[in-house]
Image (cartoon, rainbow, N blue to C red):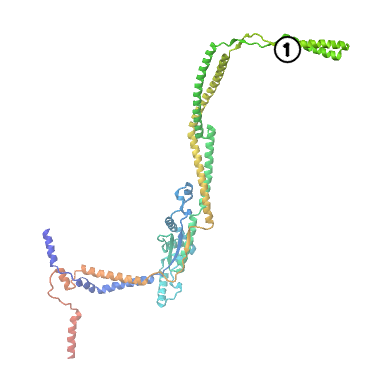
Amino acid sequence: MPFSSEQEASDQQRRPPVDLVEAFVAPLWHARYWICLLTGLGLAIATFRAAIEPNTYEATGKLLVRAGEREGGSAESRIMGSDGGGASSAREAVMNELHLLANPHLFENVVRKIGADRLLAPYDPQSQGIDHGFVTEALHSFQDFWFRSFSGDAANAASLDSEAAVSVATKILQRALLVRAEMNSSVLTVICTTSSPRLSAELVNTFMAEARAMHQSVFSSNSWLEFLDQEITEANTSFAAAEKAAADYRLQCNIFDADSERAELQRERVELEGRIRADEERIAALEATVQTLEAELKEELPTRKVLAPNPAQPNPLWTALTDRRLELKGQLVALEFGSDLSREKIELQRRALQRQLEETDKELESTPQREEVAPSQIEQPNPRYERLVVDRDAAKIELVSLRSEADKRKGRRSSVKDDLAEVERCSPTLNYLQNEASKARSKLDQVTAARAEIAVLDDLDRMNLINLREIQRASSLAEKSGPRRGRMVMIGGLVGGALSVGFALLRSRLGRRFRSPGDVKRLLGTPVLGLVPEVSARDLAQPRRQAAVGAARS
């Protein structure tokens, strides 16, 4: 291996330096005819291609896309209340619109509006009616002959039915019309390139009009309203069924609000248990009180003997004197008015009666009206015994009442426990039915609210207010946009020349013929001792011709 490396190094040192003229210029000079031929062929092909290339005219229109509630959500998202129900971002709206405008049905609608025969008609350069001189007229005449003779689309269109022609024209329009989004903008640019400026502008304007119609159709709220009306009907039916199921179960269990009734029953049970404990303590205390009072009653007598003072009695003497006085007064009155006696006798009797009356009055003054009686021993009720009896009877009455109330509370406590057990048994099913009814009600409210929002969008649709606006209509351009025939010819010549130069260099590198002394020196590594010129048959015949001419002259 080291030996071979040294040998290669020595060979490289023995090799002469590369001569650029011999390596590049000479091969090109030897192949100059091929280079000229291939370059001319490239120019000819490019010229022919430029000649048969039809003129193209570009029309441009612009659409403004605005993000709105209609494009950013759906009926389902509005019902569910998700974030999708809000307006989408401007970039998202533009991308969605690009996908929408790529729909083949949109291009088909444009074709039907314009007419498939206009799109499939052969190119007629003379129909533009513009005079550009003799050369241009000659080129147009050649193009007219070429496209009428060799236009495949036009030849096939004549044999197609209307639907097939529409299909072919739609494919052609999809290639000719471009929709692109402007950078950092919500504007869509619609570009159409055809062989007619009027057709290009008409296609762009028709496409933008159909795009607005399709946008309004796709985002129309009519289908949403029908869907929401159906959803409202179903939601009403579901809500009514859920409410009926919950109401029937409430009647079956006699429970209307499980949570509140459970809390009320638990509160009542705690209260009953507290009052029952208090009643038991009170009953125990009353029983002890009754026993104590009965024991004290046994030690007390119902009555007791006491000396009761007798009241003063009327004095009989005083009573008799009083009666005597009254009688005397009566006799005096009778003597004055009804006596038949003489006056003297009457006076004597009056004086006697007056004297008796005075004596009686004196005795009355000295005689007391009542006289004292000695106290007597009597039996009276024992007040302590009576108080003990009253306290015992009151305790017994309260005891009986408390026992009755306690029994009632215990019965109520048992009933409350049964009611709590019934609530606990029924509450899971009732809660489930109530939740179902609440969900149905919530869905009904959501659908109703969404229906109201969509109704507003429907009003906007009726006023033809959509979020895709036409901000620039296409106008026919007088100047063509293509083809660039001069550049095509130049590129053809450059390609032909590059291919010919490459062919010449490759041929010189791969060929085995020695075309110059430099090839011998470069390939064999030996010096050239001599050069034998190339003599043609014409050169060999020339001396003979000269000798013959001299002999003839002599």
* Left or right: 395, with 42 as reference point: right
Residue drawn 11% across and 62% down? Answer: 6
Q: Position of residue 416 (x, y in %)?
A: 51, 28
Name the quadrant containing residue 377. Answer: top right
Residue 277, horizontal then vertical, whole percent: 49, 24
Q: Compared to 220, does 290 lie above or below?
A: above
Q: Nearer the viewer, residue 180 or 520?
A: 180
Q: Quadrant of residue 506?
A: bottom left
Q: Is residue 116 something one can see in this rendering?
A: no
Q: Give the image quarter of residue 141.
A: bottom left
Name the quarter where the C terminus is drawn: bottom left
Residue 415 x, y percent position in the rendering: 52, 26
- Reply above or below: 52 against 111: below
Local secondary structure at mark 1? helix
Number of numbered discs present? 1
**Viewer can see residue 259:** yes
* Looking at the image, residue 31 lies above or below residue 349: below
Which residue shows up at 86% across the image and 13% down it?
A: 338
Horizontal relation, residue 453 to residue 357: left or right = left
Mark 1 crowd level (few <14, some 14–19, many ≥20, 10 Å Cα): few
Q: Is residue 106 above or below residue 302?
A: below
Q: Which residue is mark 1?
A: 365
**Which residue occupies 53% across, 11% down?**
299
The residue positioned farthest toward the bottom in the image shown: 554
Whether residue 440 sits left or right of residue 514 in the image: it is right
Residue furthest to the left? 3
Dot 1 amino acid type: Glu
**Which residue occupies the foreground of this view, 481 or 492?**
481
Q: Nearer the viewer, residue 300 or 191?
A: 300
Task: Estimate the x, y position of residue 436 in percent, counting from the top left.
Answer: 49, 39
Look at the image and tell me in which quarter the N terminus lies.
bottom left
